[in-house]
Image (spheres, rainbow, N blue to C red):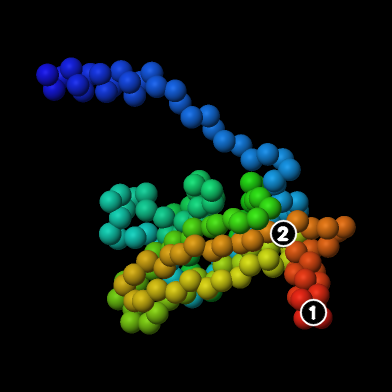
Amino acid sequence: MVGVILGGMQVYMTFRPQPEASSTPAELLASGVFQLEITLTFAAGADPFALDVSDAPSLLVSFRGQDLLRVSQEIEAGETVRVDQIDGVVTGANEFFVQASPRDQQATAARAIRVRVLQDGNPVAEESLWAEPGELVEGVVAVDVRVAAAGKTSDQIQLEEDVASDEL
């Protein structure tokens, strides 16, 4: 009886309709070139507690459910890691998951990662992610990308909106 149920489940999973890969409509894609800069306050190395230490990254950045950056070699403190081209950034909310593994698990000081997101070379988001000693440094960096109007950067649009709201 169990074999019939499991066999039926396998047939269903094999032949059920598969969801189509979603693509972002061109009108939702943000304009400009987006880059990412990550600076660590600590030396990063493979996580010694990972299930597969040989494949454990010292730095991992995910965007829209996909690995954007996966660094396996060690990274020295103060070294800036860059991603020069980020595809798929949309107008509106975007989130980057960042995780780094400290090389020295015995350190007693808190650790941080500085993350900057740039649009056409101009910062649109900056955030520091902190962790206590012995923990992975990880977190989500949220970026709200606005529609650039008439060649203006999102910072210029934000400044104009702030000035307009102060005048009210």
**Residue 43: percent from left, percent from top:** 44, 70
Is disc 2 surrounded by few (<14), some (14 to 19) or many (20+) residues within 10 Å? some
Quick check: marks 1 and 2 in contact, CB under 8 Å?
A: no
Question: Who's the residue at 28% across and 51% down the image?
Answer: 51
Viewer can see residue 84: no
Residue 84 located left or right of residue 2:
right
Residue 33 located left or right of residue 57:
right
Question: As drawn, which residue projects farthest toward the right?
Answer: 150
Q: Quadrant of the C terminus?
A: bottom right
Question: Who's the residue at 69% across and 46% down the image?
Answer: 28
Residue of label 2 = 146
Choose mark 1 or mark 2, whichever is in front.
1
**Residue 103: percent from left, percent from top:** 37, 68
Helix, strand or loop for disc 1: loop
In the depicted view, which residue is nearer to us: 129 or 168?
168
Question: Who's the residue at 75% across and 59% down the image?
Answer: 120
Q: Point out the tag, 1 or 2, that comes first from the N-terminus.
A: 2
Residue 135 located left or right of residue 122:
left
Residue of label 1 = 168
Q: CA distance from mark 1 to mark 2?
A: 22 Å
